[in-house]
């Protein structure tokens, strides 16, 4: 009988340790409480199918999609620091994921999360944000096919660009 009690106690302690470890990992990833519905952070060579909105002709996939309180929250993980706050491009990327979640799952996220290395930001997905996203997508489509020069204002971005070796305007 004593062995059975000791075994059950050990199982209980192991279960508690695993719960604690899981919570720490979730907190470190910047995820809110809730069930992870999908993730694109597995490191697999082939990521999961992208979400697609035929109205905006937009496709993409957030790093995580978390269900919390019946709401689906997209989470985008950025490896860098946040500095003064989220970049506009990151905010728009997260807004696009909110739109895709709404289009595919018929659930409008009230917000999304941008998780940087040093902190996380909850960004509201309001009609104004959705309008800004639509305007930017329309502007991008109008400019599609036009030659664009590189930005001369950010040499550090040029140095980190994945197209640097093929770019005829690379800074080095």
Image (spheres, helix red, strand yellow):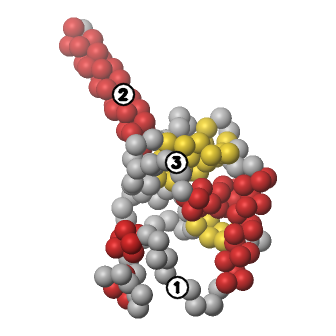
In space, the residues marked 2 and 1 are separated at their CA atoms by: 51 Å
In space, the residues marked 3 and 2 are separated at their CA atoms by: 30 Å
Nearest to N terminus: mark 2 or mark 1: 2
Left or right: 53 with respect to 154? right
Nearest to N terminus: mark 1 or mark 3: 3
Q: Quadrant of the C terminus?
A: bottom left
Nearest to N terminus: mark 3 or mark 2: 2
Q: Which residue is mark 1?
A: 149
Tell me if residue 102 can be seen.
Answer: no
Residue 18 at what x, y percent from top left?
34, 31
Eye-nearest disc, 2 or 1: 1
Q: Which residue is mark 2?
A: 20
Determine crowd level at label 1: few under 14, some 14-19, many 20+ residues with C-alpha closer than 10 A.
Answer: few
Tell me if residue 126 can be seen.
Answer: yes
Would you say the residues marked 2 and 1 are in contact, meaning their CB atoms lie under 8 Å apart? no
Where 88 sits versus 107, above or below? below
Secondary-structure class at tag 2: helix
Determine crowd level at label 2: few under 14, some 14-19, many 20+ residues with C-alpha closer than 10 A.
Answer: few
Question: Can you name the residue that lies furthest to the top here?
Answer: 2
Residue nearest the observer in this picture, 12 or 108: 108
Where 162 sits versus 145, above or below? above
The answer to which image quadrant residue 34 occupies is top right
The number of numbered badges drawn on the structure is 3
x 58%, y 67%: residue: 60
Residue 8 at what x, y percent from top left?
30, 17
Residue 39 at what x, y percent from top left?
49, 54
Q: Which residue is mark 3?
A: 85
Secondary-structure class at tag 3: loop
Determine crowd level at label 3: few under 14, some 14-19, many 20+ residues with C-alpha closer than 10 A.
Answer: few
Where 139 sits versus 100, above or below? below
Left or right: 52 with respect to 149? right
């Amino acid at each position: 009988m004593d062995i059975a009690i000791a075994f059950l106690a050990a199982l209980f302690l192991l279960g508690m340790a695993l719960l604690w470890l899981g919570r720490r990992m979730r907190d470190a990833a910047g995820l809110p409480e809730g069930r992870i519905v999908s993730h694109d952070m597995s490191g697999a060579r082939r990521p999961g199918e992208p979400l697609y909105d035929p109205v905006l002709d937009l496709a993409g996939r957030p790093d995580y999609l978390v269900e919390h309180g019946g709401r689906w929250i997209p989470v985008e993980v950025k490896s860098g620091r946040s500095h003064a706050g989220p970049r506009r491009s990151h905010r728009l990327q997260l807004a696009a994921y909110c739109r895709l979640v709404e289009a595919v799952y018929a659930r409008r996220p009230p917000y999304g999360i941008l998780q940087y290395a040093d902190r996380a930001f909850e960004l509201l997905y309001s009609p104004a944000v959705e309008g800004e996203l639509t305007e930017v997508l329309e502007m991008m489509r109008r400019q599609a096919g036009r030659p664009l020069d590189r930005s001369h204002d950010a040499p550090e971005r040029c140095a980190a660009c994945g197209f640097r070796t093929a770019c005829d305007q690379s800074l080095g």
